[in-house]
């Protein structure tokens, strides 16, 4: 499934610790149509839904809907807090082409 780095886990822990009502939430990672290259990544705090694949790491949960699983298989979710590129990012070996924005990609025809 998707690999999650220590930095991504720590950032999600930090986000969820700020509010007690977030105790059942995790990070939803999904692929949607749109963006510069045809598909783009969306991430939001959410609760598990029926049909989700769940990646759990150090007590944190990452949810992926069944339509996004083929696009994200083998990808790595990371978090960077650098000056020019702060935020969650995905390194995706399934992308046949990526856009300079870093959140848009094109999938091979078989995905």
Image: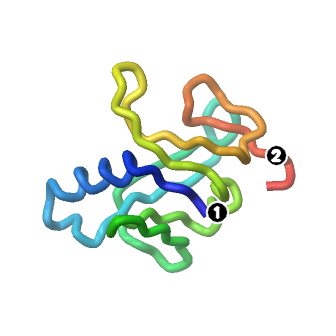
Residue placed under numbered mark 1 in the picture: 69
Residue 108's disc is 2
Cβ atoms under marks 2 and 1 closer than 8 Å:
no
- The part of the image, by quadrant, that contains residue 41 is top right
Residue 88's disc is none
- The part of the image, by quadrant, that contains residue 18 is bottom left
Outermost residue on the bottom side: it is 50
Outermost residue on the top side: it is 84
Q: Position of residue 88 (x, y in %)?
A: 43, 41
Distance from the alpha carbon under mark 2 to that under mark 1: 14 Å
Residue drawn at (56%, 77%) of the image: 51
Closest to the observer, 97 or 2: 2
Q: Position of residue 103 (x, y in %)?
A: 55, 36
Placement of the C terminus among the 4 image quadrants: bottom right
Badge 1: residue crowd in 10 Å (few <14, some 14–19, many ≥20) = many
Instruction: Determine whether, in the image, residue 61 is placed left or right of residue 19.
Output: right
Residue drawn at (24%, 51%) of the image: 15
Colour approach in the figure: rainbow
């Amino acid at each position: 499934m998707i690999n999650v780095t220590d930095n991504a886990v720590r950032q999600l822990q930090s986000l969820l610790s700020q509010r007690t009502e977030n105790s059942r939430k995790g990070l939803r990672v999904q692929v949607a149509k749109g963006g510069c290259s045809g598909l783009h990544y969306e991430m939001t705090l959410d609760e598990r839904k029926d049909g989700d694949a769940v990646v759990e790491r150090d007590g944190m949960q990452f949810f992926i809907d069944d339509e996004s699983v083929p696009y994200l298989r083998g990808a790595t979710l990371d978090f960077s807090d650098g000056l020019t590129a702060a935020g969650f990012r995905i390194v995706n070996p399934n992308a046949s082409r990526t856009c300079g924005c870093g959140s848009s990609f094109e999938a091979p025809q078989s995905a």
